[in-house]
Image (tube, rainbow, N blue to C red):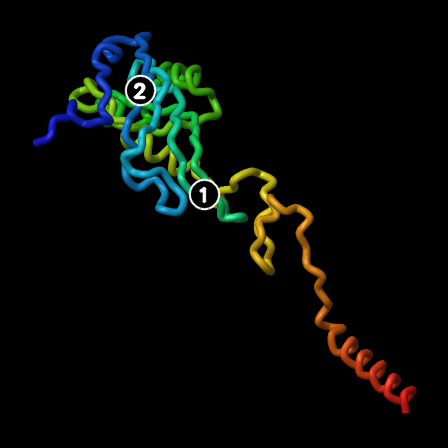
């Protein structure tokens, strides 16, 4: 049976959880869990996700506040160029002690709720994730997955003002901004043909 401490996403927090007011800094890389997007838009499984922030111990759990930065792989939905860049997302999440988890977030005392509001902001609701081995380890696998999945763009762009591709020939309009085609309105195509025919007939009459 695998041990909790052998998980690449398990962070030891026993000393922080010993009493309220303790803090623990995190500044390290963790492997990206599976299921963050897909092969078109997403974070590849196992890619290094940099986690920087801190755990703060309060009355009934730990609050983690920090930033995740992961290598984002996709392609621009307008010009189809590959996108390979760092994707940052800020997080504020809650790791309740077992007693708090059993009683539910909504049943905590007012004092505990006020402490979380001070850390996270009164209008911001925190996601909740597990503490393992009676509070000895914080499991951040689900936190990483949820935070990145929720932040991924539905229609990624290489840049906000990407001009895309020419709809007629596929030329990249970012590289050739003056590119265009002279197009005859199909509604007047038959009239143009009739005009050419009349001009040709007039020419024949003059020659005869």
From the viewer's perspective, is 27 left or right of 75?
Answer: left
Q: On the image, numbered disc 1 is attached to which residue? A: 82
**Element class at badge 2:** strand
Q: On the image, numbered disc 2 is attached to which residue? A: 28
Q: Is residue 52 above or below residue 106?
A: above
Q: Nearer the viewer, residue 73 or 8?
A: 73
- Percent across and percent down for residue 38 are 35, 45
Question: Which marked residue is nearer to the observer: mark 2 or mark 1?
Answer: 1
Which residue ends up furthest to the bottom in the rendered image?
Answer: 208
**Element class at badge 1:** strand
Q: Nearer the viewer, residue 80 or 100?
A: 80
Q: Residues within 10 Å of mark 1 (few under 14, many from 20)?
A: some
Q: Is residue 181 above or below residue 35?
A: below
Q: Is residue 180 above or below residue 85?
A: below
Query: Can residue 103 be seen from the camera position used here?
Result: no
Q: Residues within 10 Å of mark 2 (few under 14, many from 20)?
A: few
């Amino acid at each position: 049976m695998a041990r909790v401490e052998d998980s690449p996403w398990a962070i030891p927090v026993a000393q922080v959880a010993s009493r309220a007011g303790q803090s623990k800094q995190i500044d390290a890389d963790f492997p990206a869990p599976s299921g963050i997007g897909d092969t078109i838009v997403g974070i590849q499984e196992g890619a290094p996700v940099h986690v920087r922030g801190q755990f703060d111990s309060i009355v009934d759990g730990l609050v983690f506040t920090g930033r995740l930065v992961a290598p984002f792989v996709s392609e621009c939905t307008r010009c189809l160029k590959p996108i390979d860049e760092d994707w940052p997302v800020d997080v504020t999440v809650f790791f309740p002690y077992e007693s708090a988890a059993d009683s539910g977030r909504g049943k905590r005392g007012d004092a505990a709720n006020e402490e979380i509001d001070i850390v996270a902001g009164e209008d911001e609701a925190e996601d909740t994730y597990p503490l393992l081995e009676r509070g000895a380890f914080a499991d951040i696998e689900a936190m990483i997955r949820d935070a990145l999945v929720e932040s991924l763009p539905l229609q990624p762009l290489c840049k906000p003002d990407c001009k895309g591709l020419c709809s007629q020939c596929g030329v990249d309009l970012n590289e050739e901004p003056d590119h265009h085609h002279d197009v005859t309105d199909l509604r007047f195509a038959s009239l143009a043909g009739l005009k050419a025919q009349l001009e040709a007939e007039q020419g024949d009459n003059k020659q005869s």
